[in-house]
Image: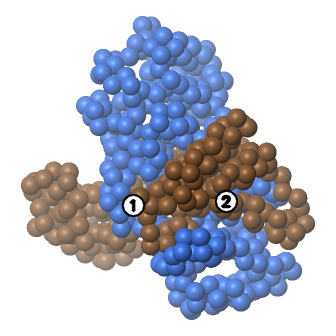
Chain colours: A brown, B blue
Amino acid sequence: MGRKVFYISDGTAITAEVFGHAVLSQFPIEFEQTTIPFVETLTKAEEVKQKLNDCFITTGERPLVFHSIVNPEIRAIIYSSEALDYDFLNTFVAPLEQQLGVKAEPRIHRTHSIDNAAYNDRIDAIHYAMDNDDGISLKNLDRADVILVGVSRCGKTPSSLYLSMQFGIKAANYPFIAEDMDNLKLPSELKAHKKKIFGLTIDPMRLHEIRNQRLEGSTYASLRQCRMEVKEVEMMFKKERIPFLNTTYHSVEEIATKILSETGLERKMF
Amino acid sequence: MGRKVFYISDGTAITAEVFGHAVLSQFPIEFEQTTIPFVETLTKAEEVKQKLNDCFITTGERPLVFHSIVNPEIRAIIYSSEALDYDFLNTFVAPLEQQLGVKAEPRIHRTHSIDNAAYNDRIDAIHYAMDNDDGISLKNLDRADVILVGVSRCGKTPSSLYLSMQFGIKAANYPFIAEDMDNLKLPSELKAHKKKIFGLTIDPMRLHEIRNQRLEGSTYASLRQCRMEVKEVEMMFKKERIPFLNTTYHSVEEIATKILSETGLERKMF
């Protein structure tokens, strides 16, 4: 049983989670984490305070609280509990007010709001990624910001979706399949958009593991097949001078940001 | 031209962006934002320092830097620039070390790493959401954590994908279409999993706007059609006692976290 940690917010608590998780991941110990979002009323705040105090009594240790509570009355109630508060919003807001010469105007739900034109672009990008996944359609490539290509299960789909969700980037993706391998080349529809093409590759052993989880014992999943496909596709990337990235040791966050970094595409924020 | 802000990291810089964006969104002014990820070498750090100093000279204002740099040598170089540093990692790591009685072991790329079993579950959840989007398949509903239902373009797809990407939740989704409306009921395949069903609805006017962007002037997009579909579906939700949420004024972050909050599904962290 690790130390108890609570992520608390009067909004989604996503920011509190991201913040707390980043800080706690620096420590080589286990934590037991609970998220409490939408603490929007004083009654709810009192319930949470009680929960924190109970936790202290039960465990004998003060629970850690990472929060991003905008409402000052609700924040005061959480502060008055036995928990240890780590309040990243207010820690930085005061020095920034001084620097900027502007008073903060805390408003709930501003971080993840739909009050900006960019939000529609983001939803468009998500639908675009869905509609242009896995080579389903090659008709809309003129609207793509980037076109990811590679063998089946090398990470194209999660990367395309992450690019759309997090950064509002329109990413299409196209798979090279077993039947293509004898004479592998870029389809003419893709060739017309070559500047947008970015390749993904993966170590054959890892690909074999991933495909085996999906279709155990199949030719598709065999190490021999994985080796052959990866070799053919990497050769083609080099011949066509398509920039590419090996996804084996990278999370979708890392893959997506490396793609943006190498292509120079702008990261939008929501 | 707003005040210049830089998000800098030796990793993806996603955490620096989320953190800085949350803090700055409290201020009613414009910022001009630049993200510089993967500052992994001293040479690159010196280049970034030069860029920050140039920015100070050009604008006459010290740029703001939000960073999550784990490597101390690289951090020192950024600190030595003319920029104003807001370092949320280190601000909180020292007090936490004292509280926990454990030294932090900063390691790069720990926040968004694939070094945990949960990462595979997350990728599975993303593929699940793709394969079970828009009623494509009703065969895998026994594996779903939640099944989102509602009219076309009420927010099911982005919400399903966000649930999978951010929280590792397996979300299927199913649309009620115009042809269903005369005698609207839950298909028997869904009825078998009724406890997992969660409804989404939307204001007809907003639905009309969204559909018009897609198919302007169509019957599908007409306000009359939108009103009728929303009314029928909401009536069915009530009759079947399906919990539901109006998405009109909510971002995908808010919709997804509200669904988790109301269904009691666990939020995983990656």
> Residue B99: percent from the left, percent from the top?
59, 70
User: In the image shown, does B249 or A268 lie closer to the viewer?
Assistant: B249
Vertical comparison of B130 with A200: above or below: above
Res. A131 in view = yes
- The chain containing the residue under callout 1 comes to A
Q: Is residue B131 left or right of residue B20?
A: left
Q: Residue at x 88, y 69 (%)?
A: A98
Quadrant of the rendered image containing residue B26: bottom right
Residue A9 screen position, x and y as percent? 65, 48
Taking depth in this image into account, of B144 and A225 the one nearest to the observer is B144
Task: Count the marks.
Answer: 2
Chain of the residue under label 2: A
* Residue B21 showing in the rendered view: no
Give amino acid for label 2: Asp
For disc 1, the marked residue is: A148
Disc number placed over residue B140 in the picture, else none = none
First of labels 2, 1 by sequence position: 2
**Residue at image location 86% in from the left, 71% down from the top:** A99
Residue holding disc 2:
A85
Query: Please, which residue is most extreme toward the top here?
Result: B183
Q: Are marks 2 and 1 on the same chain?
A: yes
Residue visible at 82% across and 69% down in the picture? A95
Q: CA distance from mark 2 to mark 1?
A: 43 Å
Secondary structure found at label 2: strand
- In the image shown, does A19 or B244 lie closer to the viewer? A19
Quick check: A92 left or right of A239?
A: right
Which kind of residue does numbered mark 1 sit on? Answer: Leu
Q: Residues within 10 Å of mark 2 (few under 14, many from 20)?
A: some
Q: Secondary structure at mark 1?
A: strand
Residue plotted at (48% across, 51% down): B166
Residue farthest along the right direction in this orientation: A101
> Considering only vertical position in the picture, is A128 above or below A228?
above
